[in-house]
Amino acid sequence: MIWDPFYECMDPEERAQLQVRRLRETVARVKANVPWYRERLREKCIAPEDITSLDDLRHLPFTTKVDLRDNYPFGLFAIPPEECVRIHASSGTTGKPVIAGYAREDIGIWAETIARTIACGGGTSHDVLHNAYGYGLFTGGLGLHYGGELMGCLVVPVSGGNTERQLMLMEDLGSSILCCTPSYALTIVDEADELGFDLSRINLKSGLFGAEPWSEGARESIEERLGLSAHDIYGLTEIIGPGVAAECGAKAGLHVFDDHFIPEIIDPETEESLPPGEKGELVFTCISKRAFPVLRFRTRDITKLDYEVCECGRTQPRMERITGRTDDMLIIRGVNVFPSQIEEVLLKIEEVEPHYQLVLTREGRLDNLEVQVEVSPAMFSDEVRKLEAIEEKIRERLSSALNIRVDVKLVEPKTIERFAGKAKRVVDMREEA
Ligand code: ADP
Ligand code: ZN
């Protein structure tokens, strides 16, 4: 089912006109109401009436995470905070949180884009939506919640944690859609094994997993163990929360809901926009929000866009799965390494579990990366010689995938931290050295 065929399957030309109109209105509104944007627009010598096509986007100023922090907490709101009905804050993966404000209309838009997201994952009003994203300032919980209600699902607002209880509820309530971070989905599988809980007792048909990067390998293991179809969903607090883009049944990229959020790809170094199909930093401009519409927000996420019409019938462009952010890229002895590349390799190795940690240290002037990964319980009892052979195999595969030498350390099952929300896999000890 497509939630809103009018917008999701709109003729691209027609949508471009809608986007230009909404963009012009948004620029006029931030110019009138946000002194910081007024100043930036003045510097760039651009006025709302100069915007006549989507090409003009490139003349608008960027907004960065630093700009949002400098204007903390309400400086970039386009309406007085007392006219907002809610705030959320980013999880602060990379520092101080960013406060996002929502007017009543914005909550409505958000619920719509989440309903589209749920429909992308095959959901309908008959579904029981088990929502294990964290409730609170984090956008995941309440975001999925309101969209689920709008769609007419039976929403189970369980939030993260207490996995045993989650398993019981999924079984007893007949949950059909699981919403959580991909790392929590793996934690659920793991804990079910530990508890001796037979996963065939739950009857999930699909999963909406996002908020952090995950790999095809993780998708395969989650789908196989939970017996569901796993869909990648994407969003960020600065733009609205989840509900910015979602993967349909074709699983060939995430449809960006670009009647609300216009995506662009730029070269992170030169800041030039790149043509469709080229990989670079994803940038979003909000064109329908009232309280907190940001212009050209630099997400630091790396991807590319595909404007071909999808086999599902949606005409909205698709972004490739995010493989990392510019700021989680590790530079090890001059080579760029994304944690997702390591995950991709590890998940193809049968003898280890999808639980790993990357420890960075500095010896003299040389960076060193140690990949710690759990061996599967069956393997752990094996002889040392066999374990050494597994370590060697992983080391070889990682070296050829990354083009650098890394250390590999197998660790006992259940020794690496489990996550109910976003995973933190990189331990960087280089500063202290
Ligand atoms: P923070 O930036 O503090 O983590 P958010 O909770 O708003 O705040 O997280 C948004 C970020 O999470 C995105 O910019 C992106 O890096 C990551 N993210 C969200 N969804 C996905 C996804 N499906 N795949 C990869 N990364 C994702
Ligand atoms: Zn599609």
Image (cartoon, rainbow, N blue to C red):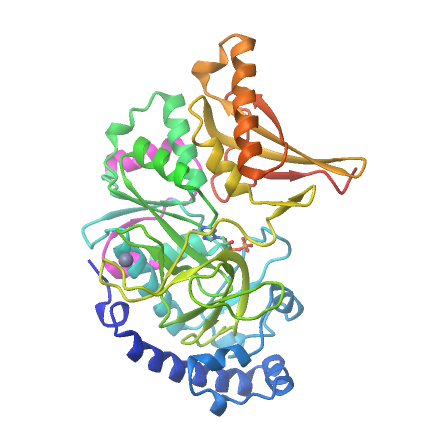
Taking the magenta stretch, the answer to whether it contains residue 161 is: yes
Residue 397 percent location from the top left of the image: 52, 30
Left-right relation of 203 to 59: left
Look at the image and tell me whether residue 423 can be seen.
no
Query: What segment carries the magenta color?
Result: 146-172
Farthest residue toward the top? Answer: 383
Which residue is located at x 70 percent, y 41 percent? 333
Look at the image and tell me whether residue 300 can be seen.
yes
Residue 116 percent location from the top left of the image: 29, 61
Taking the magenta stretch, the answer to whether it contains residue 417 is: no
Q: Quadrant of residue 267?
A: bottom right
* Vertical placement of residue 263 versus 383, above or below: below
Disc count in the image?
0
Left-right relation of 71 to 59: right
Left-right relation of 264 to 220: right
Q: Name the one closer to the observer, 261 or 368.
A: 368
Q: In which quarter of the image is residue 205?
A: top left
Quadrant housing the N terminus: bottom left
Left-right relation of 209 to 61: left
* Vertical placement of residue 22 versus 310, above or below: below
Farthest residue toward the bottom? Answer: 49
* Vertical placement of residue 86 versus 196, above or below: below
Residue 303 percent location from the top left of the image: 47, 56
Which residue is located at x 59 percent, y 69 percent? 271
Residue 166 percent location from the top left of the image: 36, 36
Which residue is located at x 34 percent, y 82 percent? 17
Quadrant housing the C terminus: top right
